[in-house]
Image (cartoon, rainbow, N blue to C red):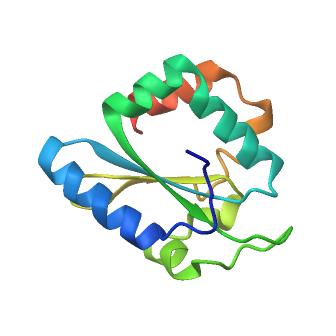
Amino acid sequence: MELFDPSRDPRADLAAARAAAVDDGKDILLVFGARWCPDCTAFEDWTAEPAIAELLARKYHLVTVSVGTERGQRDQHADLDAAFNHPIAGGIPAVSVLNPQGKIRFDSADGEFSRARRMKAEELVEFLASGR
């Protein structure tokens, strides 16, 4: 799956993830980003790593939100950003972890993932394992 696909409907994806999460108890990993963003493509590359992909599948329903198709654009789906405590305020990719009922457990409004190109796999594994 290509992350940050601007043709996807993140509201429909989120509704499906919430329904599945209520059934299986997994959290929802909501990730805001864009195809033009190098840190977002680095984050996408990390999700393809076997250990990270397995952890994602075991613990989360992954939903991605494209924030824009033009370089620097971050206003596509601004209502979703607002609904989840403005996680993109600190840069993208931005992450919100939601419980199965859709309540925020964590958001990266401080820019924790905006340096994804410089992150080590162990850092992402640690975050995903803890769910903060």
From this view, report whether residue 132 is shown above or below residue 73: above
Residue 44, picture quadrant: top right
Residue under the point 33% across and 33% down: 59
Camera-side residue: 125 or 52? 52
From this view, report whether residue 7 is shown above or below residue 51: below
Camera-side residue: 31 or 110? 31
- Residue 40 percent coordinates (x, y): 72, 48
From this view, report whether residue 33 is shown above or below residue 62: below
Can residue 87 be seen in this snapshot?
yes
Image side of residue 37 versus residue 24, left or right: right
Residue under the point 41% across and 72% down: 11
Can residue 84 be seen in this snapshot?
no
- Residue 91 percent coordinates (x, y): 72, 59
- Residue 47 percent coordinates (x, y): 58, 33
Residue under the point 48% across and 71% down: 9
Residue 36, picture quadrant: bottom right
Give the quarter of the figure containing the C terminus: top left
Image side of residue 73 versus residue 43, left or right: right
Residue under the point 37% across and 70% down: 12
Instruction: Report how many numbered discs are placed on residues in the image.
Output: 0
Give the quarter of the figure containing the N terminus: top right
